[in-house]
Amino acid sequence: MPLPLAALVALSLGALFAHVARAELSLDEPILSSRPLAIVATFAGLVWLPAVAYFAAFHGDWAYMYFVAWRRVPSAIDLAVVLACTALVPAGFAIAAPFARSKRREIVMAMIATPAAIAAILAVVLQHRVGTSATFAQFKHGVGTEPVARAALGRAMLVAIAVTTGAALWATRLLRSAPAPKKAKIDGAKRWR
């Protein structure tokens, strides 16, 4: 996924995960040390990070949507952008979690829908850039380009979508299966009365 779209989708995914985990979030545990945030951070690190990093590393010009020549982007900036896209999944969760906890569904839905809608609009408006596999120079001059569907990039996109979707569904399942609330400890003296 192109990096600008990956950032928007990451925010939306994080908010969606907060919505799914709303039952467990309502237990009034600190969000930063909660089980749901650990699940979301694991998803971000083990699934989202490799998917975004693959496209940045092997299809860099496409990942930057041909706005900049990937070869001119320092690797440190590449790394920072990939890490930022990854961090936006738990960040989206952390931003939406207080609203999910307080059952403010309309705000959480807006936090899910807004970045997703912006990503979809950008993908449609920039469909020529998203749907073309080429180098920066090929795209700039309109020579040697091919549709994504016929290139290795298209196959990689299908694999990334399948793996990410499967992992997101698994994370959703884990987030929905909230552990049973802990029973209050009974003082020994009160037990025998």
Image (spheres, rainbow, N blue to C red):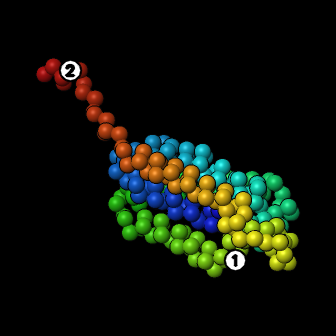
Vertical comparison of 183 with 80: above or below: above
Disc marking residue 189: 2
105 sits left or right of 183 in the view: right
Q: In this view of the protein, which residue sits in the foreground, 141 or 191?
A: 141
Would you identify the image quadrant in which residue 65 lies? bottom right
Furthest residue in direction front, as rendered: 150
Type of the residue with mark 1: His
Residue at the location (36% across, 64% down)?
104
| Position in image of residue 117 (x %, y %) | 53, 73
Residue at the location (67% across, 67% down)?
149
Q: CA distance from mark 1 to mark 2?
A: 73 Å
Q: In this view of the protein, which residue sits in the foreground, 169 or 193?
A: 169
Name the residue tied to disc 1: 128
24 sits left or right of 140 in the view: left
166 sits left or right of 109 in the view: right
Quarter of the image that includes the N terminus = bottom right
